[in-house]
Image (spheres, rainbow, N blue to C red):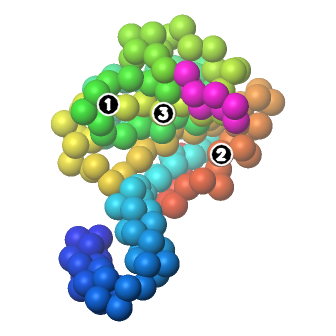
Amino acid sequence: MRKEILNASEVYREILDKYELKTLKEQLEVLLKNIDDFKLKILFVGGFSAGKSALINAVLGCELLEENQMPETAIASEIFFDTEEYIEGISEDKVDRYSVEESDTIDNSKYDYLIWHLTSDNLAKMKDIVLVDMPGFNSGISEHNKAILRYAGKGNAYILVI
């Protein structure tokens, strides 16, 4: 669908150029950029220790995320394909960059969520998809509940893991 829209936009550009409709052309360019940048965010939600991280690891084909009987995921973690591997810690006022090897040293309390940029072959097949590992609900940890409430509305699709 995206490809069809981008192909059709060439006709619209020509018409807008022909009739010198600069404002509409600028609006079209913004719209096309938004379409091109769109990624489907799939949030994995469920109780703590339901297997959200394990399921994502299975999709990735590697043991990236911590799996444990204890509540491990403290904040939302977006995971998507990139040509370079690194992690970003995102908060309202800053973005910090870490190497993937530093993942165990990141102070999650400083961030609203993390973004994992990975070169996984499995993720390369899903370039327009962002997998999101969420903290488990009912963990008894108030910070997990805050993280869930802060991020839950950003998803386009949800997978309930039980």
Which residue is denoted by mark 3 in the rendering?
115
Judge from the rendering whether residue 72 lies leftward or rightward of residue 17; answer left or right.
right
- Marks 2 and 1 sit apart, C-alpha to C-alpha, by 21 Å
Crowding near the residue tagged with mark 3, few <14, some 14–19, many ≥20 C-alpha atoms within 10 Å = some
Which element type, helix, strand or loop, lies under badge 2? helix
The tag on residue 147 is none
* Residue 144: x %, y % from top left: 71, 32
- State which quadrant residue 6 falls in: bottom left
- Marks 3 and 1 sit apart, C-alpha to C-alpha, by 10 Å
Confirm whether residue 84 shows in the render. Answer: yes
Amino acid carrying label 1: it is Leu
Q: Nearer the viewer, mark 3 or mark 2?
A: 3
* 91, 78: nearer the viewer: 91
Point out the stretch of residues depicted in magenta: 89-96
Mark sitting earlier along the chain (2/1): 1
**Does the magenta run of residues contain 91?**
yes
